Amino acid sequence: MTEYRTDDYDSYRMDYGRWHAPLEPEEDEVRVVRGALQALVEVGILPHAKYQNEPFLRFRQAVVDLFDIPWTAITPRMQRLIWAINAIRQPKVMAAAGVFCGNTFISNAGAAVGPGAVYVAEDLVGIEIKPEEAERAERNVRAIDPTGVARVVAADAVEYLRDYGRPLELLYLDADGDAERGKSIYLDILKACYDRMPPGSVVLAHNSINCAERLEPYLRFVRDPSNMRASVNVMFDPEGLEVSVR
């Protein structure tokens, strides 16, 4: 298993209800995320580790000002990393499964829409199975992106992506299945669109640390080089992010 691990990954913790509170000096956050990006470059997941800080900060402030977020487990480090990966890869088509109030979705889509956008996308879709949360997420996203390029739908991610006809360049996974499956549904979601992910497509799977046991079938799949060309477990907060490339 390839991993990027910081010494403080288990102690770097935030109050999920005070998600906007800084946890460390900005330069430390930038340094940690730069290390993660470089680890992804070294195995061929990213072409380079360069992104613009000022656009990211404009994006971050817009989320603070405009989003209704009751709580989130997306730490400042994770928000920056997800945004940076999208800014570097610049997927024209992206899907995020299990977006709750839309914060995880916009962490991906915000590189292409709203304040701080650095490229132009074609279709960015967030999928949330709970209608009331999908409605809130859509309201949040509309506050940042009036164009509709980024949008949220109320649907089952497996069913939606099975019927989604377009090639998918980036997939973000943060969904929960029923009590029996839980986070193991990640593998079902990936397999629903796997055949439409061209070489170079990236998959981001949140909770690679704290849900590693439930994710074991998924992690075994993406770490198998016959399925994914490379995969890295980014361990810089208690949740973690598995980053894989087709």
Image: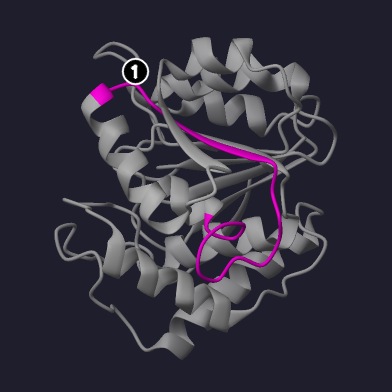
Give left or right: position of 117 versus 119. Answer: left
The quarter of the picture where the C terminus appears is: top right
* Magenta residues (range): 110-131
43, above or below 93, in the image: below
153, above or below 114, in the image: above
Amino acid type, callout 1: Gly
Q: Which class describes the residues within 10 Å of circle 1: few (<14), some (14-19), or many (20+)?
A: some
Number of callouts in the render?
1
* Colour setup of the view: one colour
x, y percent for residue 138: 36, 39
> Which residue: 61% across, 75% down?
34
x, y percent for residue 58: 47, 76
Magenta-colored stretch includes residue 206: no
- Which residue does the numbered mark 1 point to in the structure image? 177
> Which residue: 29% across, 52% down?
73
Q: Nearer the viewer, residue 239 or 22?
A: 22
x, y percent for residue 139: 31, 44
Give left or right: position of 129 versus 225. Answer: left
Quarter location, residue 184:
top left
Type of secondary structure dominating the magenta stretch: loop
Give left or right: position of 151 versus 44. Answer: left
Magenta-colored stretch includes residue 124: yes
Element at label 1: loop
> Which residue: 73% across, 24% down?
166
> Which residue: 71% across, 31% down?
168
Res. 171 in view: no
Quarter location, residue 152:
top left
The quarter of the picture where the N terminus appears is: top right
x, y percent for residue 61: 37, 74
185, above or below 210, in the image: above
Res. 217 in view: yes
Q: Nearer the viewer, residue 210 or 66?
A: 66
